[in-house]
Amino acid sequence: MPADVIRRLDVLRGKGMAAMYSWSCKRRYKTGFVWHDVSGDDILLPAQGSEYVLKGSLLLLRHSPQPAAAGRYSAFPFRQLLPPS
């Protein structure tokens, strides 16, 4: 995304905000619209007339915890909740 757009988003929403998202811009294609992924110094095209539409998708953390393996009990297995038979 162009540096001036990134600076403007950081001013409006807080420093580093633009880097937390993957960005797409809406543009006209044939009889409708498509979302075009933007990065680096890609040129942003108006969606219609002089209207620019951006969509940000939040990037996931790289070090998110792994899900528990299938078939393993959690720290508090369900069977401990059942009354003794």
Image: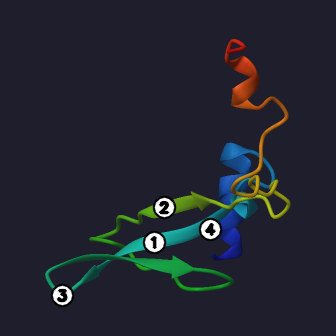
User: Dot 4 lies on which element?
Assistant: strand
In three-dimensional space, the C-alpha distance between marks 3 and 2, rounded to whole angstroms, equals 20 Å
Residue 65 at x, y = what percent? 82, 54
In three-dimensional space, the C-alpha distance between marks 2 and 4, rounded to whole angstroms, equals 8 Å
For image coordinates 85% across by 34% down, the residue present is 75
The quarter of the image holding the C terminus is top right
Q: Which residue is mark 3?
A: 30
Q: Quadrant of residue 66?
A: bottom right
Q: Which residue is mark 2?
A: 55
Q: Residues within 10 Å of mark 4 (few under 14, many from 20)?
A: some
First in sequence: mark 4 vs mark 3? 4
Q: Residues within 10 Å of mark 2 (few under 14, many from 20)?
A: some
First in sequence: mark 3 vs mark 2? 3
Q: Nearer the viewer, mark 1 or mark 4?
A: 4
User: Dot 1 lies on which element?
Assistant: strand
Callout 2 amino acid: Lys
Callout 4 amino acid: Ser
First in sequence: mark 1 vs mark 3? 1
Asked if residue 63 can be seen in this view, the reply is: yes
Which residue ends up furthest to the top in the rendered image? 83
Residue 22 is labelled as 4
Total marks in image: 4
Q: Which residue is mark 1?
A: 25
User: Dot 2 lies on which element?
Assistant: strand
Q: Quadrant of residue 26?
A: bottom left
For image coordinates 71% across by 73% down, the residue present is 3
Residue 60 at x, y = what percent? 71, 59
First in sequence: mark 1 vs mark 2? 1
For image coordinates 71% across by 28% down, the residue present is 79
Q: In the rendered view, tell whether residue 54 sits above or below residue 75.
A: below
Residue 22 at x, y = what percent? 62, 68
